[in-house]
């Protein structure tokens, strides 16, 4: 049988076996290339970090921040289940202390950013990052670090909602806003703790002074409700903030400001998501027809981090009014 041509079927099987044998090394080579490129990119990004913050709390690695944020998401998921069979906590005194404490913290951040950037001659149009140990630059970096920390403290907003069984307040917007602000600002502090980053943080800290002032007054009790007619303007102020952020960042891109472009585009995309989410919240809360009672729950009457005015001095628990007794912690 020697010298006869090989069967076409045998040739195809032989070629297929050879291709299959060559496939694993090729796949391994591709995976190895991806891993090496990823490690190289990681080493490069680490080489351009802000080395001034290396030894600051939470800044050595992203894992503490990611761990805290993961615990937050687990709390959002498991907290309502844990509270389902428990009475709500009122926490009025704690809420007053917490909210006015956040007023002081945000005012400190705003003050530090405003005075230090002014002393350093910062531009509100374009400002590159100065990684030097200049006393004002370090103060700006420290204020931005405190801003990042304040976003972690704000996770307590959600915890208080859970303990008070205000589950309707824990919307996608609420969780998305809290989770992303704390998590993403770690990146901001690690790489750009200064320069253009001061503008958004300064503006947001100022708005949070007003916002937590409102929440603090709301937590003081029904006698302050008549002074809290301006709640809707807080949402308008936040929407204005996002539009200003986009305009400011777009101008920086247009004039080719020497600030990381990836940060510019990231800020624009992030602000757009907030415009959609906060815009939808504003429309549903203030433009759609209001219903006083819906599915056994009081609609449009909740005050974030405050205590809404009860009707006929009743304590509102899980959507039901109870005229006798008090909620836990009141």
Image (spheres, rainbow, N blue to C red):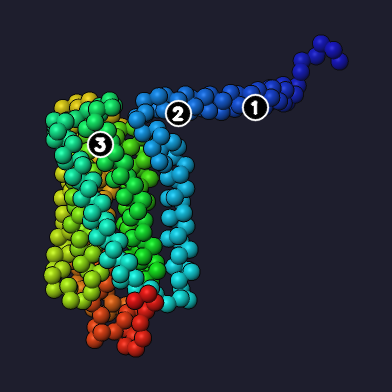
Q: CA distance from mark 2 to mark 1?
A: 27 Å
Q: Position of residue 307 (x, y in %)?
A: 27, 72
Q: Is residue 17 left or right of residue 113?
A: right
**Tag 2 secondary structure:** helix
The numbered dot on residue 42 is: 2
Q: Which residue is label 1 attached to?
A: 24
Do residues under tags 3 and 2 come within 8 Å of each other at their CB atoms? Answer: no
Do residues under tags 2 and 1 come within 8 Å of each other at their CB atoms? Answer: no
Q: Nearer the viewer, residue 262 or 30?
A: 262
Q: Is residue 175 left or right of residue 300?
A: right
The numbered dot on residue 139 is: 3
Q: In this picture, is 110 found above or below 51?
A: below
Residue 301 in view, yes or no? no
Q: CA distance from mark 3 to mark 1?
A: 55 Å
Q: Nearer the viewer, residue 213 or 128?
A: 213
Number of marks in picture:
3
The numbered dot on residue 135 is: none
Residue 87: name its quadrant: bottom left
Q: Label 2: few (<14), some or many (≥20) within 10 Å? A: few
Which quadrant is home to the C terminus? bottom left
User: Which residue appears farthest toward the right when viewing the image?
Assistant: 1
Q: Earlier in the sequence, mark 3 or mark 2?
A: 2
């Amino acid at each position: 049988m020697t010298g006869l041509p090989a069967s076409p079927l045998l040739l195809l099987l032989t070629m297929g076996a050879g291709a299959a044998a060559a496939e694993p090394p090729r796949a391994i080579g591709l995976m190895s290339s991806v891993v090496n490129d990823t490690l190289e990119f990681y080493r490069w990004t680490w080489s351009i970090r802000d080395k001034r913050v290396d030894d600051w709390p939470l800044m050595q690695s992203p894992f503490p921040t990611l761990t805290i944020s993961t615990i937050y998401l687990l709390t959002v998921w498991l907290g309502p289940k844990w509270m389902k069979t428990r009475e709500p906590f009122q926490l009025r005194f704690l809420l007053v202390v917490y909210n006015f404490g956040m007023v002081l913290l945000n005012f400190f951040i705003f003050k530090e950013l405003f005075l230090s950037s002014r002393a350093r001659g910062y531009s509100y149009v374009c400002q590159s990052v100065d990684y030097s140990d200049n006393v004002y630059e370090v103060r700006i970096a420290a204020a931005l670090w405190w801003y990042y920390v304040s976003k972690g403290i704000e996770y307590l907003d959600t915890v208080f909602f859970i303990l008070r069984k205000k589950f309707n307040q824990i919307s996608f917007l609420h969780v998305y806003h809290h989770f992303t602000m704390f998590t993403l600002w770690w990146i901001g502090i690690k790489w750009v703790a200064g320069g253009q980053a001061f503008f958004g943080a300064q503006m947001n800290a100022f708005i949070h002074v007003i916002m937590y002032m409102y929440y603090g007054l709301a937590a003081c009790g029904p006698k302050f409700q008549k002074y809290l007619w301006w709640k809707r303007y807080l949402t308008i102020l936040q929407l204005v903030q996002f539009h200003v952020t986009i305009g400011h960042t777009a101008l920086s891109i247009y004039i080719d400001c020497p600030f990381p472009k990836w940060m510019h585009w990231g800020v624009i995309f992030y602000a757009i998501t907030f415009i959609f989410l906060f815009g939808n919240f504003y429309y549903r809360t203030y433009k759609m027809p209001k219903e006083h009672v819906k599915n056994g729950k009081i609609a449009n009457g909740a005050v974030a981090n405050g205590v809404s005015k009860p009707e006929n001095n009743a304590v509102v628990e899980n959507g039901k009014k109870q005229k006798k007794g008090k909620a836990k912690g009141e």
